[in-house]
Image: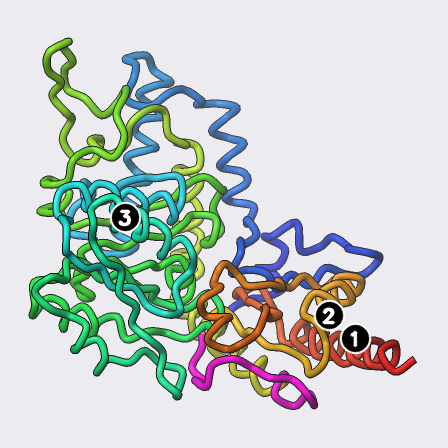
Amino acid sequence: MLNLDKIRKDFPILSRKVNGNQLVYLDNAATTQKPKPVLDQIVKFYTSVNSNVHRGMHHLSKQASLLYEQARKTVQEFINAKDSKEIIFTNSATGAINLVADSFGDAFIKQGDEIIVTEMEHHSNIIPWQKICRKKGASLKVLPITEQETLNLNKLKELINKKTKLISITYISNVLGIVNPVKKIIDLAHIHNVCVLVDGAQAIQHLPVDVQKLDCDFFVFSGHKIYAETGIGVLYGKEKWLNEMPPYQSGGGMIESVKFDKTNYAKLPLKFEAGTGNFAAAISLKASLDYLNNLNKNKIFSYERRLMDYALEKLKSIDGLTIYGKSTKRYGAISFNLYNIHPYDLGVILDQLGIAVRTGTHCAEPLMAYYKVKGTIRASFSFYNTKKEVDQLAEGIQKAQTILLASSIS
């Protein structure tokens, strides 16, 4: 079992008050809080090591470079990539998707080709593909959701054809918390020699990820959603694709030699890491992954599943509350609305009670259009959340419901 009292003490922000109430932080799908080992590592790096990586022969630079590459190795092991050179550090999951869209798109997408995304994607997994399609004269196809609110795999079989070059899909919906059958989609795509990118931004912190078992061609996630600093993302790519893709950006650090008539690019992974990246954040990512490994990831994932089950049952008991997504097997997030109450109004009252939730479209406007709503309230959970906090959320919703319905009548 997890020692929740000890774990919560590892996250200093959880002890603060908001509007005079104890903070109940339920916006983890947007960004997670940072444990002391991560915060301590950031301070330690900047106060004792800080120096640019891969740039100098002096002691601090060599130390920083070693820590940076150790972070890459830790990420490789965490997701079971075949080689650390398949791990590219970016500024975010969004940055990683843009890298693939631009670079893979430049090398392999041509006029008349097709790219498939799903109806439940985050904007970050739609817009980059729209851009490359416009640039190359390709088409963006959309895999719809069924009446059971799952992806329509029969429709996918119809969509895939000889023009299809890539499928880009979220592992877990940032709105619904529902796990997509990515392995089935990858296997189907590969039968037709189609590449697959998996957006793992909402999965990496809630599920064991093994990119070799998944056999995905690309996998992306953000550090700030898995307890690390902001400004660091990861792109995993199969070596065969990364070798054939042109650099996404150019500049210092991604070259072997430069002449006015020719430049030779560096080998993987540096080929895709132009300029000075956020190396301190990469090192904080190592600290966060080490922290999770030390706690035991399987225990974390098991606890989160039980907490989600409890939260679903608690919210279902509230009159007038609609939960989006029919699946009871969720990870991380639950989105809902209250009858006749605007999500923003509910969010404001919950905030007054110290309860932090997200309101709005959650950067998923096509999914909001599917449900015919302008937005939802989203409560998203981490292993440092408790059943007591779920109870506080339910009580807060009912209190807000009473206040808002009374005000509408008067």
Q: On the rendered image, what quadrant is the C terminus found in?
A: bottom right
Secondary structure of the residue carrying tag 1 is helix
Residue at position x 16%, y 35% in the image: 246
> Foreground residue, 150 or 33?
150
Q: Main secondary structure of the magenta part?
A: loop
Q: How far is mark 2 from mark 1, CA to CA?
A: 6 Å
Amino acid tagged 1: Ala
Give the residue at mark 2.
346
Q: How is the image coloured?
A: rainbow
The 10 Å Cα crowd at callout 1, few under 14, some 14 to 19, many 20 or more, is many
The magenta segment is 315-330
Picture layout, residue 314 above or below residue 11 = below
Extreme residue toward the top, this view: 260
The disc, 3 or 2, on the residue closer to the chain's N-terminal end is 3
Give the quarter of the image for residue 337. Answer: bottom right
Give yes or no for contact between labels 2 and 1 (Cβ–Cβ under 8 Å): yes
Give the residue at mark 1.
400
